Image (tube, coloured by chain):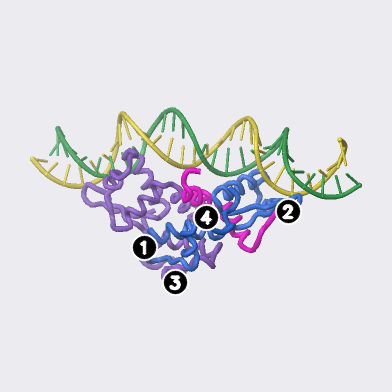
Chain colours: A blue, B purple, C yellow, D green
Amino acid sequence: MADTASDIFAALAHPTRRQILQDLKDGELAAGEIAAKFSASGPTISRHLGVLRQAGLVSERRDANRILYSLVADNLALSVGDFLSTVCPEQIVLREVRKKRAPKAASASEATA
Amino acid sequence: MADTASDIFAALAHPTRRQILQDLKDGELAAGEIAAKFSASGPTISRHLGVLRQAGLVSERRDANRILYSLVADNLALSVGDFLSTVCPEQIVLREVRKKRAPKAASASEATA
DNA sequence: GAGCTAGTTAGCCATTTAGCGAAATAGCTC
DNA sequence: GAGCTATTTCGCTAAATGGCTAACTAGCTC
């Protein structure tokens, strides 16, 4: 886990992982439900989920037998938007996430890893 | 060159390449000028530039002996912002690039590859 | 505990990536 | 063309990635 931005962009570099994030946009899903949407094997999807989690883009919680994944949209928008607004501030603008940046050890949305 | 978004995010996954984009933000630079800012060898930087160019994030032009690279900010903002506004539309908003999306075979900003 | 379902971890293989130095190409100047 | 600078392409090696199957862990039910 060298650099957060690198982890995040690397996580986004795979179409399956981007699709997983889009699927999670509408609410949390079990690992199996996610895997069912793809032709890849369960373990493969599990590893994709691991990459996303390590990048801080999803969080997980147990629900009995299953593990439910959900999107951590702030983390995504923050890191990517941060880079975007550095390199091409003319084209992009952050809306409300911006202000949440400074307070580091604040609320309880610190994800898993 | 399977998927453009994948190419772009993969290109952004490397810190050196992100730094190159930031360096180009202020205007075009020769390959050697870029390479001089890093500890990596010339060939290594040259390949990073190749990755960025293939992703459509930079364009190049010859100036006598040298090759000048410049940022293609629209491409960057468009693809990344497009994904961002799909996955987390609450956090991010595109400003003016949006409207240029539809016209496909229009102006001359089609980059090199 | 046996048996079941849900997911992850552990090996394994093929491909890609990132780095390097050496060699090739492009363009300039004499 | 010789010689110079700038940059890329060529092999090479080491490490990471993505896929699979097989085996393990976690939790539930009987």
What amino acid is at disc 1? Ser
Dot 1: chain letter: B
Residue A105 is tagged as: 4
- From this view, report whether residue A66 is shown above or below residue B108: above
Residue C10, image quadrant: top right
Q: Which of marks 1 and 2 is in front?
A: 2
Check if mark 1's residue and mark 3's residue have beta carbons within 8 Å. no
Q: Give the range drawn in magenta.
A: A1-30
Residue B50 is tagged as: none
Percent across and percent down for residue A89 are 38, 64
Real-space CA distance between mark 1 and mark 3, rounded to the nearest whole angstrom? 15 Å
Check if mark 1's residue and mark 2's residue have beta carbons within 8 Å. no
Real-space CA distance between mark 1 and mark 2, rounded to the nearest whole angstrom? 50 Å
Give me the residue at 46% from left, 66% from top.
Answer: A94
Dot 4: chain letter: A
Residue B99 is tagged as: 3
Secondary structure state at the residue bearing disc 2: strand
Percent across and percent down for residue A75 are 53, 57
Real-space CA distance between mark 3 and mark 4, rounded to the nearest whole angstrom? 39 Å
- From this view, report whether residue D25 is shown above or below residue A79: above
Q: Which residue lies under the disc numbered 2?
A: A63
Residue A110, image quadrant: bottom right
Check if mark 2's residue and mark 3's residue have beta carbons within 8 Å. no
Front residue of A61/B16: it is A61
Answer left or right for A79 relative to B31.
right
Q: Which of marks 4 and 2 is nearer the N terminus?
A: 2
- From this view, report whether residue B76 is shown above or below residue C5: below
Q: Crowding near pointer 4: few (<14 within 10 Å), some, many (20+)?
A: few
Check if mark 3's residue and mark 4's residue have beta carbons within 8 Å. no
Q: Which residue lies under the disc numbered 1?
A: B109
Real-space CA distance between mark 4 and mark 2, rounded to the nearest whole angstrom? 27 Å
Front residue of A60/B61: it is A60
